[in-house]
Image (spheres, rainbow, N blue to C red):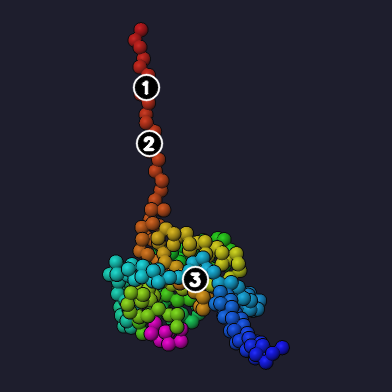
């Protein structure tokens, strides 16, 4: 083999050592982006492919803020504004029941939301209890801008406190529903339940990847929809038939 051929072969091998590791890393990185670690009920970690049915989007965030603006709601800045809204019954307390629990670390004045949001989570909790004999857990409800700002310091996925895609938690429309520890059947049930109402245009929902929850904003239209569902179905009265005439003999 000539010296020129040896140099060319050595150069080719050098190029391969540069190219293939980087390609392998890139493939590994893409694989990691497509997967997420999930802790099972027994405490073991397993990797699952991340392809959620209820994927969040920029457009969904826009729609959440459009709903806030449509209703003319205040984006709560601090605890003083929050306490005033609670005192005026603009926000109502989420109460625990057989099918509904609140995260233990949720502060007392953070266990509030809009009335239609409370109705939705109570109805969902009742349906979940009837299916599984267990409860869903609310990890987060109303937040102030101060709280959201602090949250953003250590959670890069947290929504901003202002702008077109600001967090809808600050208006009291939104809750985070826990998904940690769910079985596949329970997870699928929650997906199907939320998808149904999303497709009806009554909620905006996103399954979070790095936080173990479903982010759910409930539209005020849920109240009207629920009222329509509860209205009794009235049947039209049967038309009376004329009595046969009786001839006179």
Location of the N terminus (image quadrant): bottom right
Total residue callouts = 3
Q: Is residue 178 above or below residue 242?
A: below
Residue underneath mark 1: 243
Discs 1/3, front: 3
Task: Give the alpha-carbon distance from disc 1 to disc 3, as whole Å.
Answer: 65 Å
Q: Residue at x 35, y 12 (%)?
A: 247
Q: Which residues are magenta?
A: 148-155
On the rendered structure, is 2 left or right of 238? right
Please say whether residue 60 is one of the residues in the magenta stretch: no
Q: Which mark is residue 237?
A: 2
| Mark 2 residue crowding within 10 angstroms, few (<14) / some (14–19) / many (20+) | few
Q: Residue at x 32, y 81 (%)?
A: 77
Q: Secondary structure at mark 2?
A: loop
Percent coordinates x, y for residue 107 in the rendering: 44, 81
Task: Give the alpha-carbon distance from disc 3 to disc 2, as whole Å.
Answer: 48 Å
- Is residue 92 visible to the viewer in this orientation of the structure? no
Of pointers 3 and 2, the one earlier in the residue sequence: 3
Residue lying at the far right in this picture: please name it.
1
């Amino acid at each position: 083999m000539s010296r020129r051929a040896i140099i060319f072969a050595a150069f080719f091998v050098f190029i391969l050592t540069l190219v293939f590791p980087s390609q392998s890393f890139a493939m590994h990185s893409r694989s990691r982006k497509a997967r997420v670690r999930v802790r099972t009920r027994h405490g073991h970690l397993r990797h699952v492919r991340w392809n959620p049915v209820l994927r969040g989007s920029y457009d969904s965030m826009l729609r959440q803020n459009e709903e806030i603006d449509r209703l003319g709601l205040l984006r709560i800045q601090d605890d003083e504004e929050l306490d005033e809204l609670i005192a005026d019954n603009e926000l109502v307390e989420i109460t625990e029941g057989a099918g509904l629990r609140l995260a233990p670390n949720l502060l007392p004045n953070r266990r509030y939301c809009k009335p239609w949001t409370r109705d939705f989570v109570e109805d969902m909790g009742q349906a979940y209890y009837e299916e599984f004999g267990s409860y869903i857990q609310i990890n987060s409800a109303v937040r102030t801008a101060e709280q959201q700002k602090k949250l953003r310091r250590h959670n890069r996925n947290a929504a901003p406190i202002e702008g077109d895609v600001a967090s809808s938690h600050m208006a009291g429309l939104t809750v985070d529903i826990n998904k940690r520890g769910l079985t596949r059947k329970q997870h699928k049930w929650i997906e199907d339940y939320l998808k149904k109402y999303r497709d009806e245009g009554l909620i905006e929902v996103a399954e979070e990847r790095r936080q173990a929850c479903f982010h759910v904003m409930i539209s005020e239209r849920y109240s009207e929809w629920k009222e329509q569902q509860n209205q009794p179905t009235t049947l039209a009265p049967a038309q009376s038939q004329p009595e046969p005439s009786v001839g006179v003999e």
